Image (tube, coloured by chain):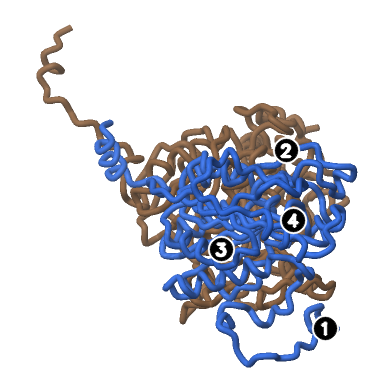
Chain colours: A brown, B blue
Amino acid sequence: MSSTALSSAPAARPAAHPSASAARVLTGRHFMLGDHACAEGALAAGLDFFAGYPITPSTEVAERLARRLPDVGGKFIQMEDEIASMAAIIGASAAGARTFTATSGPGLSLMMENIGLAAMMEVPCVIVNVMRASPSTGLPTMVGQSDVQMARWGSHGEYGVVAYAPASPQECFDLTIQAFNTADAYRMPVFILMDETLGHMTERVVIPEAEFIPRVNRKSRAAEMNDPFLPPDELVPPMAHAGEGFKVHLTGLTHDERGYPTLTAPAHEKLVTRLIDKVRLHADRLAMVDEYELADAETVIISFGCAARSARRAAVLARQDGERVGMLRLKTIWPFPATRIESLIAEGNVKRFVVPEVNMGQVRREVERLTSLPVLGINHPGGAVMTPKAILEGVRS
Amino acid sequence: MSTATAVPVHKVVESHPIDDVLRADRLPHILCPGCGIGSVVHCYADAMVKSGRPLDRHVCVSGIGCSGRAAGYVNVDSYHTTHGRAIPFAMGIAMQNRDLEVTVISGDGDLSSIGGNHLIHAARRNVPLNVICINNFNYGMTGGQAGPTTPSCAKTSTTPFGNLDRPFNLPRLMANIGAVYVARWTVLHVRQLRMSISRAMQKKGFTFIEVLSPCPTGFGRPNDIKEGLQDMEQYRRRCRVEPTIDLAEIDIEYTDPDSPIYVGDFVDIERPVFRPLPSRAEAEAIMQERGK
């Protein structure tokens, strides 16, 4: 074969890799890894400060940010462990930054005490858990979805929780932006529950122009005007940051409106009730779902994350065979979309639910609480995503 | 029902030089009679006033324990965080806003036991923080348990018949890891302590000051030290100011009444200060400078 044509052509300069860009928002159509899409979502959301520790399968989030974040003017620090990472992102947020960390199950366990601190101090921050098969070291490189209840109840005590569940690299980008806005609007730590399948999957991600990236800023004591998109009530106090001159005191102890330790039962009741109500009373605003063919569905599959991809295929196949099957996909697992599920049941068509998840029934129990209709779980503790065929068999059983 | 702090206070003076630096509405404080933590807070407050930087630039971060309560009493942006985690929390603040003077005040257990990992990494990396470690030889808040600075043979509630462990020599540890300023004082040495904290605030990088303090309730009671004044007597009699001593020689054997306690400003050096990852261009320039 003649090689003259190729060898005489001037050597083409390889196109710069997106990770070499100094633009915050990588506008364009990409073929992108889920973990990277999450990192890009954080950058697009205005991430200022990342502190993290490597752990499979989340490491690629940190690696992407190590390349990109300093070049867009943000701060990247690898800390000595996950406990330090969580502490650092709370501190940086207390000083005004939008902050983020990335981990998996074992790291989230380590972060739990400080997650409670962030909830108690009402400091916004975002934590992505790229779930893997657990418990303990488990299957480090393989999928799991078994940290759902942990995200809800993980730290000691009670506080409102919001957790997003992307089901594609595109949603890893989109819902990460959503997470930052929710964290700021409600002054709380917010979770993104990805999983190894999504994190290590490469798929199309479309990133819009920077002006189309939505941003809701935290209510600030220093600001003259606060963001008009903030929730319209007094459940979330304005935030005073370090260095603004307000002589703020933030503590993990039970405290009063000034932030001073107030170790009494009435003060505790007032504070903890508000921390819970921040989410509870806004649950309908916060809960996000995706609906497929629910209008006349007799069997409703409820699913999230990687399992939802198999579930969607199963629903499509069932519909092709004329079966009245629909799917409700959770884009937030917390708050759980109880209102939507209850309204669906009230419409009168649903005869049963099928809940496939890569855990032994953590979302299933939330559905069971809402209804006396049969709820069939399709469960696996981790290491593999159930196939559409397995879900279809369950639907048809 | 009023809170526990609503005790009538008789005003003796109309004003005091550090009134602006203290949260008067949090006084009287929770500290026991004879405790030295209040002296440390006072020295810290003085150092802030003398630092030439406005109070709005100072931040105090503390952990859990009696020493950790210090953050609540000073009238600056203050953060009372989780046990052992004040240093990484403070690092987040300091790295996000380089214009702030961030000081960590916490106890020996909080900083060197549960917090030990963060202590050594922050020192290794030379993170620009001032760390004041109030060492009262025990976990006082929880009732007097042993910790990594509890002297050999001392009695505590978890070493009821005597501690077998050898305690940390914290200045030696910090110096070996590379802290740029290391000192040890006691709450008797308030003048030197105040100057030491001032020096730490001037230094760029990780500074560490160990301050020995009485703890009559937690440590004193099981060890036949009836009041804080007795510890102060021990400090007066046994302390030797030896700034140039080999730090391998300055272990504290507190239960041996004839053993000296060495104090002083031991280390005062310069080395590059920690920063988050630089941009690619800057990183390449730095690497080139270093010959790589």
Disc 4 packing (10 Å; few <14; some 14–19; many ≥20): some
Residue B78, image x, y percentages: 59, 68
Q: Secondary structure at mark 3?
A: helix
Comparing marks 3 and 1, which lies closer to the viewer? 3
Q: In which chain is the residue bearing label 1?
A: B
Q: Which mark is residue A341?
A: 4
Cα–Cα span, label 3 and label 2: 26 Å
Comparing marks 2 and 4, which lies closer to the viewer? 2
Q: In which chain is the residue bearing label 3?
A: B
The amino acid type, in three-letter code, at marker 2 is Arg
User: Which quadrant, please, contains the C terminus of chain B?
Assistant: top left
Cα–Cα span, label 2 and label 4: 61 Å
The amino acid type, in three-letter code, at marker 1 is Ser
Q: Name which quarter of the figure residue B52 lies in.
A: bottom left
Q: Secondary structure at mark 1?
A: loop
Instruction: Say whether disc 3 or disc 2 marks the residue closer to the N-terminus.
Output: 2
* Residue corresponding to mark 2: B166
The amino acid type, in three-letter code, at marker 3 is Leu
Cα–Cα span, label 4 and label 3: 64 Å
Cα–Cα span, label 2 and label 1: 45 Å
